[in-house]
Image (cartoon, rainbow, N blue to C red):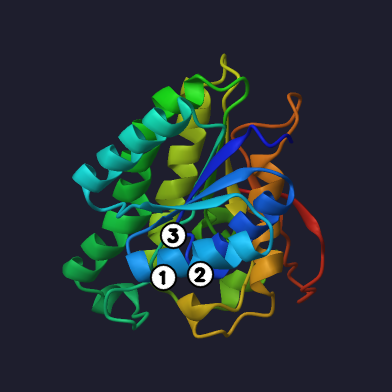
């Protein structure tokens, strides 16, 4: 990709979001670091600039429609378009406790959906007019294999043996469906919409319990963000974790 490409990454001040911005920046993409914490956003901007990337912090709280609208207006004024949108911002639980469905509070469900689902819709809809102005827009929704109904219910996945929980997995199932529906709406346009599966990645998000690094977790998002014209749309693509426990089975399309 050339230096003229512009990418917005939500939740870009740390973890997979920061690594996504770093890898895109290394490819010559101008990266806009969406973050609600200004101090952390500025620190991320300075870090990536020191590494040679063209990085700019953009105040953005995906749960605040005024903030989303302001970010879109700023991008339009500065660049006039957007080539890549990576909906990376997410949360697992308001309480920090992954409870079984029968013990999950509606308040916790709402809080998770506000970020993971409603925030994604708000940002995507605000940025879509700018993406339509790009020669070939790319939307990447950071999802998870835990949102795959096939993985959670089939015997061919290690996720089948994990404890049941409600908020995060169901929110990612919603992200998967939204990905399919946006791709369906935009299938006759140059805009491609896909969902990325980072795999079980060690970040602050999960107390650094994963077996993949943040840099590895960013690779699926970067791949989907830089797809060629003949690349897929409407798929869940990323790290594969097989039923026999193979944690390095490569990358590919996952079942919804």
The residue pinned by badge 2 equals 14
The residue pinned by badge 1 equals 40
The residue pinned by badge 3 equals 11
Give x and y (percent) for residue 117.
35, 50
Q: Is residue 11 left or right of residue 183?
A: left
The secondary structure type at the circle numbered 3 is: loop
Q: How many marks?
A: 3
Give x and y (percent) for residue 246.
80, 73
Viewer-side residue, 243 vs 129: 129
The secondary structure type at the circle numbered 2 is: loop
Residue at image position (51%, 61%) is 45
Task: Please report contact status of discs 3 and 2: CB closer than 8 Å, yes or no.
Answer: yes
As displayed, is residue 76 above or below residue 152? above
Residue at image position (82%, 65%) is 249
Q: Is residue 50 left or right of residue 89?
A: right
Mark 1 to mark 2: distance in Å?
8 Å
């Amino acid at each position: 990709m050339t230096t003229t490409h512009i990418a917005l990454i939500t939740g870009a001040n740390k973890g997979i979001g920061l690594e996504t911005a770093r890898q895109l920046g290394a490819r010559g993409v101008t990266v806009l670091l969406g973050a609600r914490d200004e101090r952390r956003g500025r620190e991320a901007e300075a870090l990536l600039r020191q590494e040679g990337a063209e990085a700019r912090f953009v105040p953005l709280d995906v749960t605040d429609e005024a903030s989303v609208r302001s970010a879109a207006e700023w991008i339009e004024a500065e660049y006039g378009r957007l080539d890549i949108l990576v909906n990376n911002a997410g949360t697992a639980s308001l309480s920090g406790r992954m409870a079984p469905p029968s013990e999950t509070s509606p308040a916790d469900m709402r809080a998770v959906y506000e970020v993971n689902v409603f925030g994604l819709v708000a940002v995507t809809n605000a940025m879509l007019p700018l993406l339509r102005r790009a020669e070939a827009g790319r939307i990447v929704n950071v999802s998870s294999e835990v949102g795959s109904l096939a993985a959670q219910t089939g015997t061919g996945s290690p996720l089948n043996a994990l404890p049941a929980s409600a908020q995060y997995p169901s929110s990612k199932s919603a992200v998967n469906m939204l990905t399919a529906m946006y791709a369906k709406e935009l299938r006759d346009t140059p805009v491609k919409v896909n969902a990325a599966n980072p795999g079980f990645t060690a970040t602050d998000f999960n107390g650094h319990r994963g077996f993949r690094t943040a840099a590895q977790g960013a690779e699926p998002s970067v791949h989907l963000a830089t797809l060629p014209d003949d690349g897929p749309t409407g798929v869940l693509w990323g790290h594969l974790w097989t039923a026999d426990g193979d944690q390095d089975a490569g990358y590919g399309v996952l079942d919804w």
